[in-house]
Image (spheres, rainbow, N blue to C red):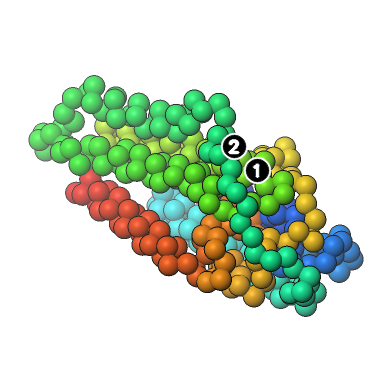
């Protein structure tokens, strides 16, 4: 295992841990660990103590993940080969940090729930007139082409090289040649379709700039995905080492780190800051947020709304259309996986 591969085994868990640490700062200012609390509670001694518990829990989970990585990538004898060891290490580390952060979040939310505001102090649910699409998507509009260019470039390069021969001399079929880039194009289109959904979410004071920031974050994450998809698509032409070898692993890890760094950089630059006060709430009852993350409220006309913890949108699973959307996304995902399986064969 090269020194870079060994170091990168620790870089990805550290980046994910950093992202989890930043989650409270990425969340909307009118809630505290997905709970509508009184004004000033987050800055109080008790609020700061709850926040420190969250930071301590995420740091502990990250350290445990790094210890697990050390055990996996530095086996005593007869261990895994470098490439499989890296894959296993990253998978185990991500699971440890994710479940550790989730458990810590639920613990902190339980503490905050004891101080939530009464229903009488919360405003009624209300849907304001939607913005125009041009008000919520990043500009200039030419930026929206960037994610697709690497994948389309890979497709053009594969087409220019003509039929690609397999080890037995027979040309590789269409699905095996173009399955990966076409699947990535489909993924990028699905990610892009999330942006107009901002027109359907509940709009609050100061919300337009934050929605635009969320969509800009999504766009730059799509750029990282497009670069990653374009690189992997050329593996059918240059062989497995193009993906799993030293240069290939380096490119993929750098792009994954870039993907994780996008929300952190935008948070550092203040893109998610918005005017607001806990008294605004988000016009949704705390009881409708199951575990603070899943929203279920049949009485709320909103189909989409902003997450209370972290950054992004979520569905109101109390609306039948939410399940139609979920099933549609699952069907599209199964179709893309099927295309990828056919391509591998």
Where residue 86 sits in the image (x, y, percent)? 46, 51
Q: Which residue is mark 1?
A: 208
Q: Nearer the viewer, residue 176 or 166?
A: 176
Q: Quadrant of residue 111?
A: bottom right
Q: Residue at x 83, y 67 (%)?
A: 38
Instruction: Please provide percent x and percent y for residue 258.
Output: 56, 39
Give me the residue at 39% from left, 38% from top.
229
Marking on residue 168: none
Q: Along the horizontal axis of the image, is 160 left or right of 224?
A: left
Kind of element beneath mark 2: helix
On the picture, is 300 further left or further right than 57?
left
Image position, residue 130 (x, y; %): 58, 47
| Mark positioned earlier in the residue sequence (1 or 2) | 2
Query: Residue 135, labelled with which disc?
Result: 2
Q: Nearer the viewer, residue 161 or 206?
A: 206
- Residue situated furthest right in the rendering: 45
Is there any visible trace of residue 337 in the rendered image?
no
Q: Residue furthest front?
A: 129
Q: Residues within 10 Å of mark 1 (few under 14, many from 20)?
A: some
User: Would you say the residues marked 1 and 2 are in contact, meaning their CB atoms lie under 8 Å apart?
Assistant: yes
Tell me the distance, in whole angstroms, between the alpha carbons under discs 1 and 2.
7 Å
SS at mark 1? helix
* Residue 50 at x, y percent in the picture: 79, 67
Q: Residue at x 79, y 61 (%)?
A: 279
Mark 2 nearby-residue class (10 Å; few <14, some 14–19, many ≥20):
some
Residue at the spot x=64%, y=75% of the render? 287
């Amino acid at each position: 295992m090269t020194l870079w591969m060994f170091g990168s085994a620790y870089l990805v868990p550290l980046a994910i841990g950093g992202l989890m640490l930043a989650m409270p700062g990425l969340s909307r200012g009118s809630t505290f660990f997905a709970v509508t609390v009184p004004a000033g509670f987050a800055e109080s001694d008790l609020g700061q103590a709850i926040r420190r518990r969250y930071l301590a829990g995420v740091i502990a989970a990250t350290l445990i993940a790094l210890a697990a990585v050390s055990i996996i990538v530095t086996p005593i004898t007869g261990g895994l080969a470098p490439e499989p060891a890296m894959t296993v290490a990253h998978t185990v580390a991500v699971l440890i940090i994710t479940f550790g952060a989730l458990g810590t979040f639920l613990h902190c939310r339980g503490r905050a729930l004891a101080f939530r505001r009464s229903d009488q102090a919360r405003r009624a649910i209300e849907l304001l007139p939607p913005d125009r699409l041009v008000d919520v998507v990043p500009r200039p509009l030419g930026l929206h082409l960037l994610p697709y260019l690497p994948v389309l470039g890979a497709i053009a390069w594969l087409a220019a090289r003509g039929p690609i021969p397999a080890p037995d001399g027979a040309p590789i079929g269409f699905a095996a040649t173009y399955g990966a880039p076409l699947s990535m194009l489909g993924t990028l289109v699905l990610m892009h379709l999330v942006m107009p959904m901002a027109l359907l979410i509940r709009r609050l004071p100061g919300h337009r700039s934050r929605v635009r920031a969320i969509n800009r974050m999504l766009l730059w994450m799509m750029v990282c995905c497009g670069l990653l998809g374009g690189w992997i698509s050329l593996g059918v032409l240059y062989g497995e080492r193009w993906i799993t070898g030293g240069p290939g692993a380096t490119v993929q890890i750098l792009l994954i780190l870039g993907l994780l760094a996008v929300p952190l950089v935008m948070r550092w630059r203040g893109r998610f800051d918005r005017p607001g006060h806990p008294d605004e709430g988000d016009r949704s009852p705390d009881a409708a947020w199951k575990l603070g993350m899943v929203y279920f409220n049949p009485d709320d006309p909103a189909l989409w709304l902003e997450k209370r913890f972290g950054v992004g949108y979520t569905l109101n699973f109390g609306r039948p259309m939410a399940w139609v959307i979920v099933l549609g996304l699952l069907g599209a995902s199964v179709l893309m996986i099927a295309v990828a399986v056919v391509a591998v064969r």
